[in-house]
Image: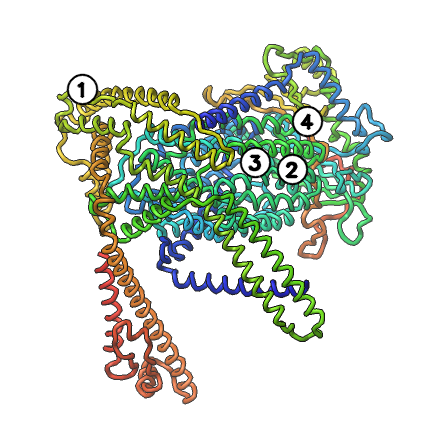
Amino acid sequence: MKTKKLICIVSVTVIMLAIAATAMTGCTTKLSGDEAYDILMEALDLSLTGDMYGPAYDPETSETNGYIFAYKEAVRSGDVITNTNVNVHCDQDASYNLHVDEDLMVDLYQETWNVNAVTGGAGSKIGDFGFIVGPYPGADSNVERIYYTENSSDGSGKYGNVKVYDEMTAEDFIASEYFRRYSLAARLEELRQMPRDAFVFDEDADNIYQQINLVKITFKVTQTYLDKYAETTGRQSIFAGSSYAEIELTFGRFSNIYVYRQENLGGSFFNLPQEIYSLQVTYLGKNVAFPGGHDAKDENENPVYTLSDGLLERTDLAFAKAVV
Amino acid sequence: MASTIKRKINEGITQVKNAASFIITDVTSHWSKPGKGNYVSYKEILNYSIGGMGQNMLIYLLGYMALGVTNTLFASTIGIRPMHLQNMLTVQTILNIVFQIIRGKIVDNTNTRWGRFRPYLAIMGAPLAIISVIFVFLPFESMSYSDKYTAVFVFAIAISIGQPLYQTAYTNLGSVISPSTAERSKVLAISSLIYSFAPTVYQLFVPIFSNLTGGFTDIRTYKFIVVPIGIIGVFLSFFAFFGCKERIVSSKHFVKKVSIIGGCVAVWRNKYWWLRTVSTWFNFLEGAYLVLFGWIYIYGTQDMNVYGILQTVLSIASGLSMFATPFFLKWLGNKGILLFHNVLNIVFIGCMLACYEIPLLYFLFLWINTFINQLQLVYNPVLNAEVKDSIQWQSGKRVDYMLEVAALIGTPVTILTGYFLPYIYESYGLTVNYDVLYDPSVRNSLFYMLCALSILGAALNLAPYFLYNLSREKHSMIVLALKYRAANTDYRTGDLTPHQVKDLVESYNYMVERRDAAQPDIKEKKEEMKAAKAVFKTAQKEYEALYERIEKDTPKGEEVVKTDELLALEEIYHQQKQAYKDARFAYKDACKLKRDKEAIEEFIVPEIGKWDTPKMQVKLALSRAVVAIDKNDVVSTPLDLSGVQVPDLTEWAAALAEKKRAAKQAKLDSRGKGGTAPDMTEWAQKKAARMTKSLEALIKRTALRYRIMQKLSKLFFPEGLVCDYEEAYRKELEVVCTTKEEKKAQNKRIRAAQFKYNRFASAYKLYIESEQVILDYDDRNNFFDHILGMYDECVAEAARIDREAEEKARAEKAAKDAEIAEIKLERRIRKDAKKDAKAHGAAFDEAYLEKFKQEHADDYAAPTTAADESADGAPPCDIGADDAPQDAGQTSDGASDAKKEGSDNED
């Protein structure tokens, strides 16, 4: 009798696990190419409703007041890899409500690497630059400052070790033309403008599906589109030279995009797809902290960060290096 | 009321003082030598605990190299995708089947002078630490994704091959450190409490120091904070290797080889193992909530200082829980603690689900749940050890590591369920970029789902334990049966010790006493207990009411004067309290007696009468047929089984039917429902038919195995057997080496002998098993025919050995005390001589010291101590006197003589 009970328990367990596995599979719905395209466009619009540079921005209705987002972008162009992290952040209360009007901060950091000739990955760093904007920590807390640092190792001497600051609010910085190119809208601009016929979906493969709150879309881009894009904008598309791309949408908003190129890395076993472009977006990033030693002084008691009026007018700064 | 509380507090303080005094006395008096009836000294417990700290610290480092979607090093820091990690994990799980089998085979056939598990604690730590160090120092910042992917895969697999050997060596050492369940749980509880100090410290400081190196998503944290912890751990784990012993209840005779299939089948036939294994299949769900605490602080509040402090507070819960486990085990019993743990898990994870948005409240419930959850750290090894004993009783095979090999049967379930959480993570937006967890809308949806899944997992985890009934009483009867079996063999081999005889006969007498005791009516006892409780409560109320009345009338600051009436009530109160205690004890004892009787019926009766069963009779006949042929003639002689017949089972079936009917009737009677138990003849006949079939299969299987043996012996030993390979191997193991070169050469000889023995054991497996069956049969009555009669003699002999050991320990202690006293005196003289030199303005040197000694010889005469006398009976040494060095020499010689004598005794 006891053995029978035991057999029953084991059988029920295995059956339950099998049902759970089936249910898991059942939660995944395959999508057609057209459905995927429509969902993608809706998600792009929804993602940008809070972005003041976005197409559907309405300051009256926007919950995030047009600001809050964070993304990490990695672009591999020729023999250079550029990583860009942008984080527009504000505090939240115990109930997770965002307080955009108070303590708004921006953290922007970009670094450029040479591609390692042996591994194909990041090799030596060419240079980096970063902005931190927000309320100045300390006694004079009403003043907001923009801190700018830059380090270069390219040996040209053009971009030395720069540490400057200016007085500016985060709102002003975001509203400036300089920030515009780093906005989320700027990152999603190309996708938003892509026509349906630019996408090639493989509807027979199981790579376009909805899985509870996640939509995953795998596609290729037509050469016609790539040529047309280059012709009309004078720049290369992020899909240029790609084998395929993946887009992930979660909770109806844009989350990630990965563009791959198939590369032979020495033998079929290691023939993994190589990312040539990636963009990972969240709608609230990590807390932003001021750079260490922002108020530090050198051996002559001079501040390490020196005042630079019209910081954003310094067009010779690293913006020129940004790969957009 | 206030005075009652005060009185109770005072009583409580006295009890705590008494307990503390008892603990101190117990620890100091049993520091090097275990107490009566125990096996493990406190020194050994401390060594085991420090080893545990080391093991814990290295495992902490290796934990960061474990494949899994929640691994911060692989996922967040190095940037490997969760699904890729899960794929690697699947490959690792499949590879693990092979490695697990190899590991099981190696460990269960390990038979070194250091034991079965301890060698792996010593030899596995350093290589694992080195692999981890190499991994974290790889130049990830300049590696492509495919290089990172390959590196993670190779290193994680390499670590996963060796880590279980190291990790389980420590836990398995805990399960064989004592054959007594109660002592084992005590040892595990104390050691857990001590070794949890290590995680308490590093869990506090690692998050805080990680602020300096960029947090847990920065590789520098692993390089400069986590790695050193692991390296220290390697060194500490040597304490467990050098300072502990393994005590497996089995014959002292040579350990037979356990085959993989034989070991696994033995495990799979055990019901308790199945129940525990099936329950663990749902751990993947129950553990879903575990990541949330880290996520709340890493991605929510982002306050690593508070996180570090809370982790420390959390580890206190673990320590307290480990300390409390033996009490819970005693209070609830084996099944009770399993149900208690899992039911409370459901309740507290439910509370976490309700308040996951409030970090501190969430932490409070997490703390309580951790306290409940960590009970298993102590009770799991205890219960696992019991299951191992149960398997040994059932199959006759001692399987330790094979338990984990047998668990590979659940690999498909593990692989399938392993994809469940990554699936949920992905479905809630956590695909590659863990930064989405900073967004509360994403984080909270995932939290809600993970908590709900944990509750479901805890409920599924609980279900199998409703069938778990391996009680403490059953386990002690299993141990008695094993002792009986081992003693029968040890009597033949001459390995039986007086202590073993004393222990076994006393356990046997207790069993007989319980078996023959009249079973009181449990219901009646319960009613009596309830009635006694009611009377006691009334007496207590009356006494307290009068006490408070008198206290009210007593002026403040004065003591309450006890009137005659109060004294009378107090006496009644104490009497009723004692009566209630007695009634409660009687009820509990009646319940225990019932369980004891059931356990005796289940384990001891079949053990004693096992040779009368049809199965063992056929097995014996088959074994005799095999052994009738000489080993060297096996190849040329066919096996003649014509004389082996399946016996007529009609009588056996009738007896079985009657026994079963009687058991059912007793059950009905005990429930008080009345009625007559059904006729079980049909059931018994079916059982007899199945038995007949199984015996026929056994005969056929033996014939087949014999043919296989013929082929293998022809293949491995074409020229026949030239010696006793088992004896040769054992002799090589016993050779004592003094130099490194000798050891090296001896190890080579051991390996060669082991190789030959392994070949012999696999080719002649059937023959060896048959010989063992016949030996066991011949030994079956050793206990009743010889050992029982040796009791009085052995008790006296054991007392003599104990006395001698005690005297030896005392002499050693006295010698040590004398040595310390001498050193102290020397220091005092030197100090005084320095002062004297300073006072006289003279330079202090050795000559001055000698002169000072001679001048003040009388002042520094050492007082006579009992220690001195007991050490050698010599007078106290007199520094400065002409014969002082001689005296000192005598003392030390005396001590060394005592030591020598001791070592002679040991030899």
Badge 4 and badge 2 both on one subunit: no
- Measured along the vertical axis of the image, is residue B66 above or below residue B867? above
Looking at the image, which is closer to me, B764 or A299?
Answer: B764
Nearest to the observer: residue B682 or residue B206: B682
**Residue at x 31% of width, y 19% of height:** B693
Q: Secondary structure at mark 1?
A: loop
Residue type for callout 1: Ser
Disc 4 versus disc 2: nearer the observer: 2
Q: Quadrant of the N terminus of chain B?
A: bottom right
Residue A296 appears at what percent x and percent y?
69, 53
Label 3, residues with CA under 10 Å away: few <14, some 14-19, many ≥20:
some
Respond whether the residues carrying marks 3 and 4 are from the same subunit.
no
Badges 2 and 1, same chain: yes
| Residue A317: mark in rendering | none
Q: Position of residue A50 (x, y in %)?
A: 79, 29
Residue placed under numbered mark 4 in the picture:
A255
Q: Which residue is mark 1?
A: B642
Judged by depth in the image, the label closer to the viewer, 2 or 3, is 2
> What residue is shown with label 2?
B350
Q: Amino acid at mark 3?
A: Gly
Q: Mark 3 or 4, which is nearer the eye?
A: 3
**Residue placed at 70% from the left, 13% from the top?**
A35
Q: Nearer the viewer, mark 1 or mark 3?
A: 1
**Whether residue B788 is situated above or below residue B392 in the rendered picture:** below
How far is mark 1 from mark 3, CA to CA? 58 Å
Mark 2 or mark 1, whichever is nearer to me? 1
Query: Residue B287 shows which numbered tag?
Result: 3
Q: CA distance from mark 2 to mark 3?
A: 13 Å
For badge 2, the amino acid type reads Gly
Mark 3 or mark 2, which is nearer the start of the sequence?
Answer: 3
